[in-house]
Amino acid sequence: MRTIVLLACLAATASAQGRQGDYVAKNFRFTTGETLPEIKIHYTTVGTPRQDARGVTRNAVMILHGTGGTGRGTFLGRGWAGELYGPGQALDTTKFFIVLPDNLGHGESSKPSDGLKAKFPKYTYDDMVKLQYQLLTEGLGVNHMRLVMGTSMGCMHSWAWLYTYPDFMDGSVPLACAPTPIVGRNRMIRTAIMDALRNDPHYANGDYTGPLEGMKAAQGFLWVMGAAPLNNHRQAPTRPVADSMMRATVARGTASTDPNNMIWYFDASRDYDPSKFLDQIKAPLLHINSADDFVNPPELGNVAPYVAKLKHAKFVLIPISEQTRGHGTHSLPAVWGNHFREFLNGLPER
């Protein structure tokens, strides 16, 4: 029986590669006052939207990726889709309509490297959420969400959704962030990443023509953000292995990352602060962090007190174990899936 279930889940994962498309917003105005005549958001959908007798979409779920990621790259792999999208699983794609955007500045959506370079508008998380909303309502005809959830940056977007469009969703599941401003060590690392690129002698105010040496330092700082000491110690038990793994990680990131894109998507968090808007939040909420998250460590106490101020909200802190992966635990539903299923099964329609 176990083999049959596993094969069914794998088959569902393989077939759930989804439909891709682009939505183009016209005359998009950014929070900075900058405008573009057209801006594109790429997306993947899995499943079919369904409406009730009143024409309200009831089964749509939007899942939002982290900084530097993409919708397909993060949420169609076996570790995520194989745990959530199969028959009888929490987000069974025969029942749910899954929307996976490449968010502004990422993947196949509009970004600085498309041609504008440093002239690309300096977008914020509010701009990214606004474009997600236009994708859903104008591009896909979705007028209500069953759930908005996301990892890391997508976690923060989920919080922004809660107060920006408080009546648009039944519930939200932010994974691996805090509903407070990005300050302290979190902001320091982001600043180090951006400075490593901007201060490179070949950055040329964003008009660079080749690789930047500063990208190596930026990728090193990025790796630190996701570090999980217990897992890292197990992966790299000797000095040569540790050196080799670190250098390979930096090399991969350096080869695949555009400096302007990286600066823009890290700086987009500069005015994030849901704590100012808690009184506007109406939808039920399940917030999940892991205790070994380097950038969102539990000792800061910047999640539970804010979640406690909300009705129908719960905070789950996953204890450190051999299964957790620091910040990256956000992408392991095998670790937190039971909490998620319980929340989703008890979620009323709004």
Image (tube, rainbow, N blue to C red):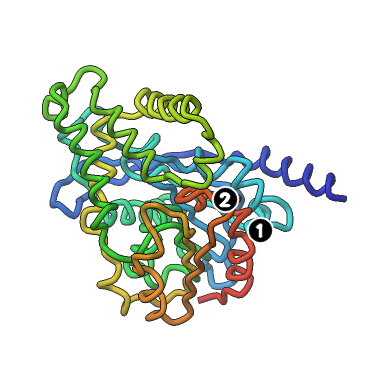
Instruction: Please give the name of the residue rendered at 58% of the width and 70% of the height, measured from the top-left corner.
Output: 343
Q: Nearer the viewer, mark 2 or mark 1?
A: 2
State the CA–CA distance, disc 2 to disc 1: 22 Å
Q: Is mark 2 on a helix, strand or loop?
A: loop
Please tell me whether residue 145 is drawn above or below residue 67 in the rendered image.
below
* In the displayed structure image, the side of residue 249 where residue 24 appears, left or right: left
Viewer-side residue, 140 vs 332? 332
* In the displayed structure image, the side of residue 163 where residue 330 appears, left or right: right
Instruction: Please give the name of the residue rendered at 36% of the width and 53% of the height, measured from the top-left corner.
Output: 295
Q: Position of residue 262 (x, y in %)?
A: 28, 37
Q: Earlier in the sequence, mark 2 or mark 1?
A: 1
* In the displayed structure image, the side of residue 253 where residue 235 appears, left or right: right
Please tell me whether residue 205 is drawn above or below residue 124 in the rendered image.
above
Q: Can residue 151 be seen in the rendering of this structure? A: yes
Q: Which amino acid does label 1 sit on?
A: Lys
Res 70 quadrant in image: top left
Q: Is mark 1 on a helix, strand or loop?
A: loop
Are discs 2 and 1 less than 8 Å apart at CB?
no
* In the displayed structure image, the side of residue 54 where residue 41 appears, left or right: left
Q: Which label was assigned to residue 332?
A: 2
Q: Can residue 141 be seen in the rendering of this structure? A: no
Q: Position of residue 49 (x, y in %)?
A: 57, 56
Q: What residue type is labelled 2?
A: Leu
Viewer-side residue, 123 vs 140? 123
Instruction: Please give the name of the residue rendered at 13% of the width and 52% of the height, measured from the top-left corner.
Output: 33
Q: Which label was assigned to residue 95?
A: 1
Instruction: Please give the name of the residue rendered at 31% of the width and 38% of the height, measured from the top-left corner.
Output: 221
Please tell me whether residue 265 is drawn above or below residue 181 in the rendered image.
above
Q: Position of residue 178 (x, y in %)?
A: 36, 63
Q: Where is residue 43 in the image (x, y as percent from the top left)?
A: 45, 43
Q: Which label was assigned to residue 155?
A: none
